[in-house]
Amino acid sequence: MKMSLLDMVIDIMSDMDSDNVSAIGDSGESTQVARIVRSVYFEMIARKDWPHLRKTLALENSGVSAQPNRLKLPTAISKLDYFAYSSRKETTSDQRFKEMKYLYPDQFLERTNNRVASNDNVEEVIMSDMTMFILNDKPPTYYTSFDDEWLVLDSYVKDLSTTLTGNQAQCVAYSQPEWTHADTFVPDFPTEVFPTFLAEAKSACFARIKEQEDRKSEQQASRGNLAMAQRGFKVQGGIRYGNFGRGSRKGGGGGNNFNPNQYTG
């Protein structure tokens, strides 16, 4: 089951034979334990793309007609996973979305530099004192980012809108979880991850506060991390391991098939 920050602090301090507390700030040690729990949480969050943090999001319009080809990312995301934009050329056509293709900034500029600035369908757009050539008569195909804040696209349809608009985009991204340093705060992990989270926090507290090893917690954390690596996404069924032709699942041959039971400790 999930635990509040205070529940975790009490559990860890009990295992360390420390004083009983009723709030995370009751003592210097409980305050330190709570801070270690927080640092372990963000360290675990940074290890992988967590499925429960994968969400749809809305992009912001640029609001600047002189820069019609950009959209702003929300600040609280760690990774953009999917980005599509409307492929309509006319208001009367059916709404359809096309996934945008990412280019590195230099590749993006190299591609747009091939456009003829004197053509009626090419606009010169200046961003950060740099000029780029953007088409104004077709839906975008490519995008990049120069600052990890704004998405810059290669074209837009001027007859539909004076700028690209966030409501014409589809985006999926991994959000940045929030942390509230309070007794009742429950860290944003799936229920099945909490035993591993608690074990890692407990091991870290023993090492940093007691300057001791807690082998039981370390082993539990290792088993939990292995299970998380195997499980991965609920929908996708976790990691797929190859069968390299030696033995079979039924025959029990050795081969290179991964056996998680060899790491039971």
Image (tube, rainbow, N blue to C red):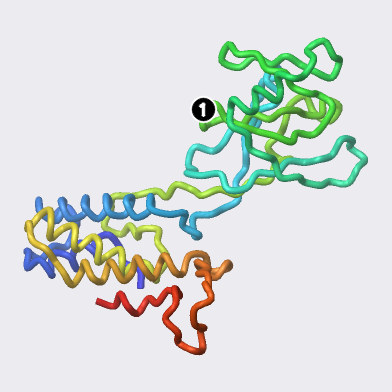
Q: Residue 121 occupies which quadrant of the picture?
A: top right
Across and down, in percent, residue 174 comes to: 51, 49
Q: Residue 21 occupies which quadrant of the picture?
A: bottom left
Most extreme residue toward the front is 246
Badge 1 crowding class, 10 Å Cα cut-off, few under 14, some 14 to 19, many 20 or more, is few
Across and down, in percent, residue 56 comes to: 60, 51
Above or below, comparing residue 17 to residue 104 in the picture: below
Q: Quadrant of the N terminus?
A: bottom left
Q: Is 125 in front, or is 186?
A: 125
Q: Quadrant of the C terminus?
A: bottom left
Image position of 259 (left or right of 70) = left
- The structure residue drawn at horizontal position 31% and vertical position 54%, both measured from the top left corner, is 41
Q: Is 185 in front, or is 265?
A: 265
Across and down, in percent, residue 22 comes to: 16, 62
Q: Is 236 in front, or is 166?
A: 236
Above or below, comparing residue 264 to residue 163 in the picture: below
Most extreme residue toward the right is 92
Instruction: Give SS at disc 1.
Output: loop
Across and down, in percent, residue 193 comes to: 37, 67
Q: Residue 133 occupies which quadrant of the picture?
A: top right
Dot 1 amino acid type: Asp
- The structure residue drawn at horizontal position 49% and vertical position 78%, both measured from the top left corner, is 246
- The structure residue drawn at horizontal position 14% and vertical position 56%, both measured from the top left corner, is 30
Above or below, comparing residue 93 to residue 264 in the picture: above
Residue wearing tag 1: 147
Above or below, comparing residue 174 to residue 157 in the picture: below
